[in-house]
Image: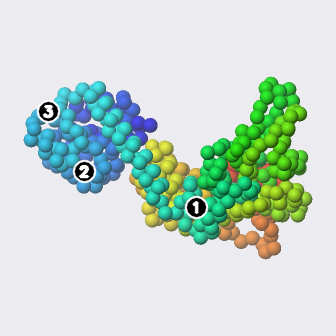
Amino acid sequence: MRARWHILVVDDEEAMTESLAAWLREDGYTVDTASSGREAIEKARAREYAIYFVDLKMPGGLDGIETLMEIRKFQKEASVIVITAYATVDTAIAAMKEGAQEYVVKPCHPQEISLLVERIIRVKNLERENAILRRKLTRHYSFHDLVSKNPRMAEIFDLVREVASQRSTVLIQGESGTGKELVARAIHFSGDRGERPFVAVSCAALAETLLESELFGHERGSFTGAIAQRKGKFELADGGTVFLDEIGDISPKLQVDLLRVLQERRFFRVGGTTEIAVDVRVIAATHRDLATEVREGRFRDDLYYRLNVINIRIPPLRERIEDVPLLAQEFLDRLSHELGREVSGISEEGLRVLMDHDWPGNVRELENAVERALVTCKTGILGAGDFAFLARPAGAVGASASFPPGLTLQEMEKQYVAATLSRLQGNVKAAAEALGIDRSTLYEKIKRYDIPR
């Protein structure tokens, strides 16, 4: 993590510059050097450095104090350490008066330098974390980890507050990547069960037998490999909330088992004979239209009505495009800190690219786009060029493409998925990333729609 902190050493003595830079590089920092004040200022304009070591007396142009003053004009948060072989009280006072953080006398001792830099970096880390926390606390359009200024999302926030402390089952519907689990967590943690467990399970990721064991647990010897008793998600969530993601993908048998749990709050472990009672709130989510699934006989109507007590439909990102700048900055703040990238914002041109994109993968795709741009960014601001990968190749099918009239939503989805796979030569991993969905979800769609790869 130290490599993310950039340091500039400025000294006209080459031996001094290289030895100090070598010490700092051995400590894991990224270090550049400059042999004059003017060269230092040029480098400082091109890159933001966390710490500057500046020699006080440099012949031919700017001395250390003048270099310090110029750097502080456009990098007010930089930490400048003045180094000199001619230490006097007057020079120390002058350096501190102009904003120097420390004053080091030559010859510099490696251990002293290491401790000094480590102390400064520790403070900078705390300042950065505090800035992120302050931004979160003062954000006007947030609710828990949800960020939006869209009127429909504001209604969802209000509904979440109203139902948070109720026991009623909640069904959250929305396209993949819209943030269904975030809404579920907001419901749980803003209600009376907030201090109790929140247990999430993806119903699409496991086969029927494994999912049954995952939900209800199993007894020792109940099947091959069951070498010990194991509690399921419902037991682990007792007193709290179970979040069943992609509930529309469960098998008919598990639909019956789940219906019984919702009705009676009781179940048996796999291979067990003792009935277990639990106090669990169920929040389910799906990208499917469950009403259609019921009409077509793929989902039980009685389970649907049990789940659909409180219904929350999350709009796709393309229908709340005004949230893109808010979400992009939120992701930038978090990811730049996690990835150790000194990137502070997004240019107007960069935001225009993001606003013009149709986001078939919704919020998840936006987060992935910001992360990718951060990794490849060469400056302190994300520009239009950093998001060039969002541009569609000629002939690619997108959300704004024209479809023949009379197509159902499922038929449109099939065409979109098939076109994406075709464009990427059947590469499922790349297609899943382009669509903003998990590979397991894409495999399910390929199988369901019988799409050739």
> Is 266 placed left or right of 136 in the picture?
right
Q: Which of marks 3 and 2 is nearer the N terminus?
A: 2
Is any atom of residue 416 visible in this view? no
> Is 251 placed left or right of 284 in the picture?
right
Numbered disc 3: secondary structure: loop
Q: How far apart are marks 1 and 2 (CA)?
A: 38 Å
The residue that mark 1 highlights is: 391
How many C-alpha atoms fall within 10 Å of the one at disc 2: few (<14), some, or many (≥20)? many
451 to 397, vertically: above or below: above
Q: Earlier in the sequence, mark 3 or mark 1?
A: 3
Residue 219 picture location, percent across and down: 83, 30
Q: Which amino acid does label 1 sit on?
A: Ala
Q: Quadrant of residue 434?
A: bottom right
Q: Nearer the viewer, mark 1 or mark 2?
A: 2
Q: Distance between the residues labelled 3 and 1?
A: 56 Å
Residue 43 picture location, percent across and down: 30, 48
Q: Indicate the quadrant containing the N terminus: top left, top right, bottom left or bottom right.
A: top left
The residue that mark 2 highlights is: 71
Numbered disc 1: secondary structure: loop
How many C-alpha atoms fall within 10 Å of the one at disc 3: few (<14), some, or many (≥20)? few
The residue that mark 3 highlights is: 85
Is any atom of residue 345 visible in this view? yes
Q: Residues at badges 1 and 2 in contact (C-beta under 8 Å)?
A: no
